[in-house]
Amino acid sequence: MSTDSRTWFYTTPQPRAYFIEERVNHTLWRNRLGNIWLTCVQPETPIRMVGRWADAMEVEFEWQPGKWFVMRTGEETKELIGVMRQVLMFRPAFMYQDGRGMTCVEWHTDGGEERWKEIQRRGEYHSIRRLSKPEPAASS
């Protein structure tokens, strides 16, 4: 099966866990991540997948198709961030550590300015940093 992020991120996939798993896993494998496996635990929006990379590191994906994507990993890994940047076809907005100690990287099609303000207000997030420039405010 040939698939890419257009079949599961840029369009809303059917809410069937198996189909989502197949599309996402095949996309990752095709993009040099042959040692990752994710299982869909919530096929409705926001879609959630959990799994492992190289049988060692915990990985979680959560997204609202066409709007935002969050990747949570047991540790910061530039390789996985780089592959997801290529898969999603745009730069991540920011990175932080959540209350569980997971490294979180977020992509937002609108730049994520509202989300950026939200995570700065919440005390359970640490080491917050931008990975791309914020979108300029629209003038009226």
Image (cartoon, helix red, strand yellow):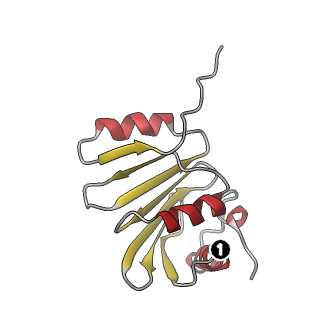
Is 129 positioned to the left or the right of 8 in the image?
left
Find residue 140 and report its horizontal and vertical position in percent: 66, 13
- At label 1, the amino acid type is Asn
Residue 53 in sight in this render: yes
Find residue 72 and report its horizontal and vertical position in percent: 41, 62
Q: Quadrant of the N terminus?
A: bottom right
Is 99 positioned to the left or the right of 1 in the image?
left
Instruction: Read off the residue under disc 1.
Output: 31
Q: Is residue 115 above or below residue 52?
A: above
Find residue 101 and report its horizontal and vertical position in percent: 27, 61
In the rendered image, which quarter is residue 22 located in? bottom right
Crowding around mark 1 (Cα neighbors within 10 Å: few <14, some 14 to 19, many 20+) is some
Residue shown at 29% from the left, 47% from the top: 125
Residue at the top extreme, as displayed: 140
| Front-most of residues 44 and 3 | 3
In the rendered image, which quarter is residue 11 located in? bottom right
Residue at the right extreme, as displayed: 2
Residue shown at 44% from the left, 83% from the top: 54
Q: Secondary structure at mark 1?
A: loop
| Front-most of residues 55 and 6 | 55
In the rendered image, which quarter is residue 116 located in? top left
Residue 47 in sight in this render: no
